[in-house]
Structure formats: structure tokens, C-alpha cells
Amino acid sequence: MNIFRLSNLRSLMAVFAVASFAFVATNVAAKDPIKIGFSMALTGGLAGGGKQALVAMEMWADDINAKGGILDRPVKLVYYDDQTKAATVPGIYAKLLDVDKVDFVVSGYGTNLIAPAMPLVKQRDIVFMGLFGMDNNKKWKHDKYFQILPSGPDPAVDFSSAWFETIMQLNPKPKSIAFVAADAEFARNLKGGAEVNAKRLGMKVTYNKNYKPGTPDFTPIMRAINATKPDVIYVAAYPPGAAGMTRAVSEVGTKAVAFGGGMVGLQFSGIMKGLGPKLNGILNYDFYVPEPNMSLYPGVVDLLKRYQKIAPARKVDPKGWYLAPWSYAYLQILGDAVNAVGKIDHAAIAKYIHANEFTTVVGKVRFGKNGEWKKGRTLTVQWQNIKKQNDLEQFAQPGIRKIMAPAAFATGKVQPFNSLR
Amino acid sequence: MNSNRFYLIMLALVILSYLATALIDNQYPFFAGFAILQLMVMALAWNILGGYGGYVNFGSAAFFGLGAYAAIVSYQLFAAPLIIQVLVGGCFCALLGLATGYLTLRLRGVYFAIATLALLVVSETLIHNWDYVGGAAGAYLLPSRTLDFFGVLIVGKEGGLFSNNKEFLFFLMCILVLLTIIICRTIEKSKYGRGLAALRDNEEAAESMGVPTLKLKLIATVISASLMGINGGFFPYYMTFIEPTSAFSLDISVNALAMPLIGGTASWVGPVLGAVVLGTLQQVATVTISSEINLLIVGLFLVGFVIFAPDGFLGLIKKLRKRGN
Amino acid sequence: MFSFELLANAIVIGILLGGFYAALSIGLSISFGLLDIVNIAHPAFIILGAFVCFIFNSVYGFDPILVGIIFAPAFFLLGTLIYRVYYESFEKTGATALRGLAFFFGVMFILEVILIIYFGVDFQMVQAKYIDYKITLGLVDIPFRMFVPFVIAMIMTLGLQYFSSKTFFGRAMQAVAQDSLALRLMAIDPAKIKRIAFGISLSTCCVAGALFVIVMPIEPSIGRLYIGQVFAIVVLGGLGSQSGTLIAAMLLGMVESIITTFFGPSWAPAVAFSALILVLAIKPTGILGRVGDTRG
């Protein structure tokens, strides 16, 4: 083809014009995404929670992109599996920041997986949202760290203070307490905080021991506890231990008027379903339960409905009550803050988050010292009215986990342990 | 490779690693590099007892973890600086290695392996129950942003020899690796090394020929343990946070024996090769495929090598050389 | 606070726990004790069995122990297959212990990944009528959750003990450990014996898995917590002796139970392993191991 012939030249120019227009148009439309990076436990001991969280986080990314994204740019999540191994975390965050060049980082799930990332975020002086870590900022005092765990300003102690307030409503007031905890981070921290609360209330400690993870049978521990005749029993456990202690107290029985406190795992569907009526009477912590008052959290019912639709296909916890609302919320706060500030300025964003109250799927959130919640909102719930064995749906009804505290959400009054069994 | 050339190459590597820290801005290679080098030291140290001596250590993580905890104790007790932490870790593990050596005196092969596993479980339990180092909740070590040593600014954003702690740690770990290689090579070429080999091939025969097997075993255990302890001593400073599960992790034990296996146990080259291959693979997989597939890769690699190349890379190279002749 | 009720219950639970531990370790006493195969993936196979029982229990409602027994032959075949691969690759002796270790570490990781992919990472439990049942005899409670596994474990262990000493194959198994050359001279292929033995070892994993998921909730990587325990029991009992393993398991169960009841559970593992180190220091071949056993 002779390009110098006028007709050919004109066609060529037309093609060229169309091509450049298309090029410019697509590049303008495909804006540079805002990248949010994190590590998450997708394998290993905490993966049950980690995978649950990831599903909710991806839902948030889709939701905010539907509304235009952050600063009019689409959000992209960049994440790697930390395998529940603390040693992988520093390298992962270094890659996220230096190679993937993410704009923001948020944490993985669990105190021990958040801790190894702290030095890097402190060094870069960037905003860091934390997911369910106990007091990670105590030593670092990083002014840009924010934790979504609703414990309160003194996390370990405030976490269980509602539980202690609740048991003090029993008549007669309990005077002695037994502690048993798993030799694992969260359980030990909870027990530490609970010990402070017990001391404050002048309670006598009749038993205080830890057990190793992997203990198959808890009846010896249960008997040993009973032999010391405590009024209440505070159990800080991870899923296998929580299930084991629940079975042990079912078999052996107890005269204590309250049992529970820091049992992790009762909130997971598989365990709930497996234990069934054995859970009746247990007084434990929780973050969100399907009680009517909880719909005070705007959007949470809707969020859980959507989560529960995709959960089975993703092979994650079918209900998502434990982590889904919170992992959605910690990103929600970040997104809202960045949009409010209007630019990627970590100092300004941190200042904004400190200064403002956010309305999220977990209600109103306000941060205080060290990035912890200004006022704790861990729930104390009492399991009751569980009738069927091996039925998960009964737990979706109200009246199973009645809320004892905080008062604003209460749907029931605490009863002695044995009266509900 | 003759000794002069060897030492020249070592020196060149030292200079190269310093230059790397000075020239590369991106911090990620130093994190990944540190992790790989750390495993390399474990593999080399393991090989002294396992490859040269034939005694399989099942619980290498015990020495690593106890070295790390000895370091954190020294930090908590008297704010020890990094060098002291590391030395404390090494010395403590040397003593522990000596004790373990005596205890497992009469045990052969597989019993020794189980005894090291028992040591791992006991040490992990002891640390879990020791509140001074935080037990299961862990302990913190916050390194300062700047570090100076008798007036010379070693770590500091402007003007320091290294601009941050991670690059400094990377450089120190390079030095440790090179030192360990020198130790291994010296052992290999010495009378001591030959004694160990005799011990490995047939302990009874060696004894009847007058080889002081107990002394050899003890020396090997002490050297292996102290190197692992020194290695562990760096861990708290690097992680800034230490807790028993990661310090005594099964991964450390598995890698310590998998890397010499994959690389070859005959000389120091094996663990180095193994660490480079397996370590890099794991680091890359963590930040790319990143899921349970990561674990699958390690598993397939182990199984594959064991089936197809039981003497590791060194064995393969030997075979290829033979074929070439 | 000592009381006879506490002591009696501690002893009973200790025995039941010992039975459970015996079920977990008996297979290893064959593969590691007799055949010198460092099968570190043994607990992982148990968890595989546990998940198989879980899925049939949760989808079809079958009793987990029944599922365990039905699938034991499948595990036997799996065992013979894996042994074949292991055997073909290790023609030379020498660093066999190391290579075996690495091979089975690899197998363990592969197993875990398969479980994660098929079952997910969440904790799972099973349902069976007898799990909540218990009998009370005077001061002592016997929970069926522990009693049923104990009974099955006893049957399995005593069955294997009988098999080892009274049947031809069983005695051939013992022989292959002691003197495989002599076996060959008698025109018996040691490799075939070892293959069958390893198959048996793995089939016990299937049944042990059923017992495991009755006792506690499972997730793919939970087997790792038991590696140290099962090896310790086999070594403590003496390599090559099934009854030794049983005794060692009982001992460990009792020690754990009593220490837990009277001193606190956190020291239990340290005590168990310290006991192991002590026994090995005094009698290196273990409780019922053959004196002068120079395998190593």
C-alpha cells in the first residue's frame, strides 16, 4: 500500500486518531488503584479466623469500589499468607512496602502476628489498623496505630471487666475464683487481665494453672478445680481447650455459679454445633451475637447475610459472627478516614482517626490512648435454651446467647450456671 | 580450592555484602536475605554433627530457641547490647550442648534423635511456664534507631555505616555465615574431621582403633550447639518480639535437616546449596503463591529429593562428573 | 488438697488416657520400632483418618469408629504403596534415618495440604450417642468418651501383640527387624514382610483417627502437637515391643493425669519427656527393649 496516496493517508490518520483516543480514554478510566497490603493467617492454627476475615475484607473492597473507591481510585487488596508464623511477618511487610509499594498496610489476625510488623510501621511512620491484637502498642506507643478489638484503654484488664461486673450481680456475691488458661498468647493475656480484676474485687484465688495446647482430656483439671471449691471459674482457652473444658464440666459437674469468661472457640460454628446443649449456662465473652439489640450496629445484619451466602463456597466459617463484622469495620474506618482527609497523608489521617467518632458495621467507634478503644464494648453473654444436638441453625435465633453486659445492649439477666442446665 | 583462594573469596564476600547494604535502597531483600542466611547457619551447624558425625539432631530448634531466650534474658536483666546478647546465646548453648552430649553418651543414632526431640519439648515447656520472659505472651525487645560503638555511628539514618537495623543485622548474619563456613571447612580438612568421619561410618570399629569417640562427639555437639545458639541470639533483635512457638518452631528443625539433605552432607557446600535453594524457594513462595500451596511445595521438594537425589546436589554433581569422565 | 476421690479418678482417667495414647502409638511401634522407618507423618495419617471419619459422620451420620474400621483396609493399601516408594528409593543404607525423616516430613506436609484443600481449616467435631454417656462406680466416673477409645485401643494393641507373636507373618515381622539375612536364607522376602507391616501400621492410624476425633476437635495441622508424644512412647517402651509401647503409653497417661490433678497441667509434658530422658539414661533400650540392641 502506498501511504503517500491521499486516500490511504486519510484512512491511516483516522485509524491513528481512533487509536490514540482509545488509548487515552482507557488509561484515564483505568486509574491507578490504591493498594492496601497485609498478611493474613490462611493456613495454620489461626486460619479459621483469618480466612473468615479475608472474605469480609474482600466484601468491603467490593463495596467501597462500588461507591467510587478511595479518593476516586479503586481499592486493591494485596495480601500474603503468614501461615500463623510470626517469623514470616517482617519479610511480608517489607515486601508489601518496598516491592509492592502499597499505599496502606493493615494487620493480620492475632496479637502474635501483629507484633512483628510493628517495628516496620513505626520506622516508616505510617497508619496501621490492627485486627484483634491484645495491647500490641503498649511498648511502641505508635501514634498511628488503631486496634478494632473493642477491649478498652487497658486492653487485658478492660476485656474482662464486664464479665466480673456481671458475676457480681449474682446473689450471693461470689467471693472466690479459680483460673485455668491455655499456654497460648491470647489466653494468657486474658487471664492476666482477669487476675487484676479479681484482685480489685477482693476475690480469693483458689486455683490458678495453665495447660498445654493439645491436652486431650480435661476431667482431671475440672476435678482439681472443684476440689478447691471456687464460687466462679474463669477459663481462658483456645478452641480445643474450650471444647474440652465444656465437655469436662458437663461430665464432672460443678458447684460454681459461673463458668467461662475467656473461652475462644465457642464463637466458631463447628464448635458451637458440636457442643450443643453442653454450652447452656456458660458465661463467656463475645463480640457480636444475633440478638435483636445488636442490629443497633448499622449494616451488620445485611453484611452477615451476604457473607453467609458466599461462605460455603469459600470453605470458611458458615456464620461469620466472630470476625466478619470487625474485619469489615477496620478497613471501613481506614477508607472513611482517607476519603475525609482527601489525600494520602499518614500524619493527617492518623490525626483524623484519633479526633473523630466513626459509625461502622460494629456501631460507633472511638479511639483513645495508644489506639485502643476509648470505651470497651466486649459483650458478656450467657448461653441458654440450647435444646438440639448437632444443629447450627438454632444458634441463629435470639435468646440463645443473651447479652448480660454492656447495659445498653442487655437482653437478659445473669443466672447461676447450674440453673440453666 | 586452596586455602588462600578460599579466604580471598570470603573477604570479597564480606565487602560485597557491605556494599549491598549501602547501595540497595529497597529493604525487602535484606529481610528475605536474613531469613535465608539464618537457615543457612542452622543447616551448616546441623551438618557438623549430622553430616560429618552421622548423629541426626531432631530438635535443632531447641538450641536456636534457647539461644534466643538467653539473649532476651540478658537484655531484660542488664540491657545487654546485641553483641553481648548473641554471645550469651552462644555460650549458654555451648554448655547445654555439652550437657546433652554427656546425657546421650551411651545412645546411638536413633535414640540420640529422640533425645534431642525430648530436649526440644522440655525446653519449650519450661519457657512457656517462665513468666519472667513472658511465657506464651512473649517478650519485647525494642532496638533503638541509632547505634553507636565507641563513637562510630554504626546504625543511623544519616551518616551511619548502615542506615537501619535490618541492614546491619543482614551484614552481621553474612559474617556469621562466613565464619561458620570457615569453621566447617577447617573441621573437614583436619584430623578431627577425619575422626568424625570414622565415627560416622562405623562407631564400634573406630573405637576399637583408638578413636576417642566420646571426645569427638562432645566437641561436635558443642560446636554445633553454640553456632545454633549464636544464630538464635539474633532472633529477638530482628523480630523485636519473641514468643515460644516461633522460637521453637518445628520449621526450624525441619529446615535444619532438609537443607543438608537437599544440598548434600559431605561438605559445607551442601548445606549452603540446600539453604539457597530451599530457603529462596520458601521466601519466594511466601510472597507469591502464598497459601497452602507453599507447604505443598516444600513437601514435594523434600519427597522428590529424597527419592531422586538422596545424596543431594553434591551427590548429583558427583554422579554427573563421573559420567562425564 | 488430697482426697481419695481425686486420686481414684486421676488413676482411672490415667488408664483411659493411656489406652488412647497406646492407640495413637501402636502403629508407630511397628513402623519405627520394628522396621526402623522414621515415620514422622504418623500423627498426620491419624488426622487423615480422623477427617475421613468426620466427613462420613457429619454427612451420613455413621458412627466414627465404624467408619474407622471400614476404611482401615484402604489405609493398609495406602501403607503398602507408600512403603513401596520408600523402599525403591532407598537401596543404599547409610543415611537412611535422615532420608527417611526428610521423606516423611515431606509426606506430612503434603497430607496437611490435602486436608486443608478438601476440608478447610476450621475445627470439626463428631457426634455419637455414647460420647456424652458415663457410668459411675462409687467414687469414680467413667466417661464413655474416653472409655470407648480405651476399649478399641486395647483390642487393637492386644490383637497386634497376638499377631506378632503367634502368627507366621507376625513372627516374620519380628525376624525382619532382627536378622533379615536369615529371613532371606529361608526364602522369605523381607521387603514383602516390611510392606505388609507398614500397611498394618497405617491401618491402625485410621482407627486411631476415629478415636482421636471422638476425644477432641480436629483441624489439619493438629497432628503436629503429637509428634513428640508418640515417638517418646515408642522409644520409652522399647523399640520392637508392642507390649512395651502399651506399658509406656499407660505410664505416660497415668503420670500426666496425676501430675495434672495434683500439681498443675502445665508441667505434664516436661515431666513426661524428662521421664523419657531418665529411662534412656538408665536403660537405653527402653522398658521392654532388648538389652544389647545396637540398632541406631
Image (cartoon, rainbow, N blue to C red):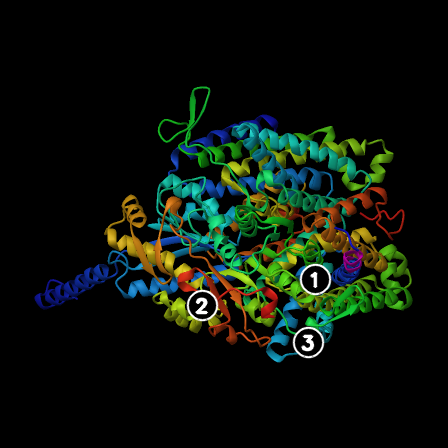
Closer to us: C119 or A245: A245
Is disc 2 placed on a helix, strand or loop?
A: loop
The stretch of residues the image draws in magenta is C4-10
Q: Main secondary structure of the magenta part?
A: helix
- Label 3 – label 1 distance at C-alpha: 41 Å
Q: Where is residue C151 in the image (x, y as percent from the top left)?
A: 79, 69
Mark 2 surroundings within 10 Å by alpha-carbon count, few (fewer than 14), some (14 through 19), many (20 or more): many
Nearer the observer, disc 2 or disc 3?
Answer: 2
Residue at the extreme bottom of the image, as rendered: C60
User: For this view, does A405 lie left or right of residue A415?
Assistant: left
Q: Is residue B83 above or below residue A403?
A: above
State the residue position of label 1.
C85
Determine the image quadrant of residue A348: top left
Residue B39 in view, yes or no: yes
Q: Which residue is labeled 2 in the image?
A: A411
Q: In this view, does A86 lie above or below A390?
A: above
| Residue B303 drawn at (x, y percent) | 63, 56
